[in-house]
Amino acid sequence: MSDLSLFAEPRELLPFDGSAILFNQFFAEEFTRSAFDYLYNNTAWEQPEIVMFGKKHKQACLSTWHSDAGVNYVYSGVERVAHPMNEVLSEIRRRCETAARAKFNSVLVNLYRDGSVGMGWHADNEAVNGREPTIASVSLGATRRFDLRHRQSKHTVKVDLENGSLLVMSGLSQHCWVHQIAKTAKPVGARINLTFRLVREA
Ligand SMILES: O=C(O)CCC(=O)C(=O)O
Ligand SMILES: [Mn+2]
């Protein structure tokens, strides 16, 4: 087997209590470039105010929520109003559904403008995601480090999420682990992350 094909092999990141499978170079470079440009320029980015420790803060990440089930998404005291999917999101979703062997009806689109923007420790464990959700996370643009930490043992897994990668989290991963994108002082460009989910109407 050549070195190149080794890179393309999906890799399980979690040693126990759930699954997080990383597919590097899942999307071809040409596709990622046009998808990034389209989403960067055509998304009506929002900067929601979240509630942390009883105080309102503007979330550092710009983002939008798209759902063809029309389901609004509530987390950290904020309600994200559902926008329709567009063609680029639908195409990426189709490819994720095949790899993840799961269905998705919604996606949270996040823009990390540079290294000063991160996302703190959390799990995607809101009831609207359902029990043991499968979540497909696509990275476009700059590489950023992604950390997973086991809630009990504090075992930590650190991995670079590169342009064109797909990370499929499932099973107990949202119950037993938390995850983050740490801020970095290194000069990094913009990154767009898409997390596809299957949410249920209330
Ligand atoms: O940007 C990432 O890779 C993670 C995003 C995330 O955890 C989320 O949107 O819930
Ligand atoms: Mn998350």
Image (cartoon, rainbow, N blue to C red):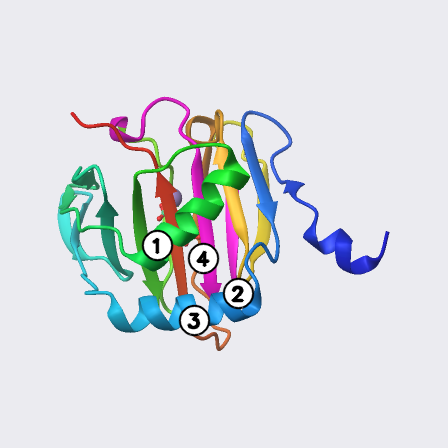
**Tag 1–tag 3 contact (CB < 8 Å):** no
Q: Residue furthest bottom?
A: 187
Q: Residue at x 20, y 40 (%)?
A: 73
Which amino acid, by three-letter code, is at mark 3?
Answer: Ser
> For mark 2, what is the residue?
143
Q: CA distance from mark 3 to mark 2?
A: 17 Å
Q: Amino acid at mark 4?
A: Ala
Q: Which mark is residue 68?
A: none
In this view of the protein, can residue 115 be seen by the observer? no
- Say whether disc 1 or disc 2 marks the residue closer to the N-terminus: 1
Task: Please give the residue where the numbered disc 3 appears in the rendered image.
Answer: 34
Alpha carbon distance from label 1 to label 2: 20 Å
Residue for point 17% across, 37% down: 71
- Mark 1 or mark 4, which is nearer to you? 1
Amino acid type assigned to the residue bearing label 2 in the image: Thr
Q: Which residue is disc 1 drawn over?
A: 89
Q: Which residues are magenta?
A: 127-149
Tell me, for residue 182, which label it has, or none: 4
Query: How far separated are the C-alphas under marks 3 and 4?
Result: 26 Å
Asked if the magenta segment contains residue 110, the reply would be no
Q: Residues within 10 Å of mark 1 (few under 14, many from 20)?
A: some
Q: Nearer the viewer, residue 26 or 98?
A: 98
| For marks 1 and 4 on the same chain, the one whose residue lies earlier in the sequence | 1
- Using the image, determine if residue 104 lies above or below residue 61: above
* Crowd rating for badge 4 (residues with CA inside 10 Å; few <14, some 14–19, many 20+): some
Q: CA distance from mark 1 to mark 3?
A: 12 Å
Q: Nearer the viewer, mark 4 or mark 2?
A: 2
